[in-house]
Amino acid sequence: MAGTFAQVFVRGRLVVPQDAEATARNIMANQTLFRLGFSGELLHLACDVAVAVLLYALLKPVDRYLSLLAGLFRLVADVILAVASLGHFATLRLLADADYLKTFPPDQRHTLALLAMKLHGDGYAICLWFSPSRAFRAGT
């Protein structure tokens, strides 16, 4: 649920895929929502790791090796999504008003922030290859 919130109600509403300036404006105007989306995604990841471990423990009596393989694939998907989540967080860093970013004009920072969000989406797409249940949810 928290991951869905992050995708649908945060990134889905704030990110304008072809307009870096509009995306930057939306994110900066809704920083609290954007941070909540990032927190929701981290909560989703923590719960997903717990579910992977629980499923392994429950299914181990049926087939230990298959259960271990399924659990490992699930954890690999979680690690990939965790790394991809850095793109969500990096967007705020790129749009911040820090002194070290003053060397970049605002339009370049906006473009880099949109690129970070697109890389997050690419990472999510890659993690789907390792998690059949996520692929099913994404297809529905």
Image: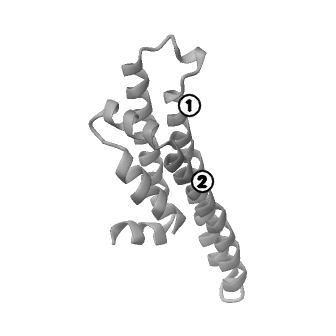
Give the amino acid type for the residue marked by disc 1 in the picture: Arg
Q: Residue at x 71, y 88 (%)?
A: 61
Give the amino acid type for the residue marked by disc 2 in the picture: Ser
Image-based side of 88 in relation to 57, left or right: left
Quadrant hosting residue 135: bottom left
The C terminus: image quadrant: bottom left
Could you say which disc has been placed on residue 39 in the image? 2
Is residue 129 visible in the rendered image? The answer is no
Disc 1 is placed on an element classified as helix
Depth check: 135 or 61 in front? Answer: 135
Is residue 121 visible in the rendered image? The answer is yes
Percent from the top left, x then y, of residue 10? 43, 53
Residue that extends furthest to the left in the rendered view of this protein: 18
Q: Residue at x 53, y 46 (%)?
A: 32
Percent from the top left, x then y, of residue 77? 56, 58
Q: Residue at x 36, y 44 (%)?
A: 15
Alpha-carbon distance for marks 2 and 1? Answer: 15 Å
Residue that extends furthest to the top in the rendered view of this protein: 103
Image-based side of 37 in relation to 23, left or right: right
Disc 2 is placed on an element classified as helix
Crowding near pointer 1: few (<14 within 10 Å), some, many (20+)? Answer: some
Percent from the top left, x then y, of residue 108? 39, 20
Look at mark 1 in the image and give the residue it sits on: 93
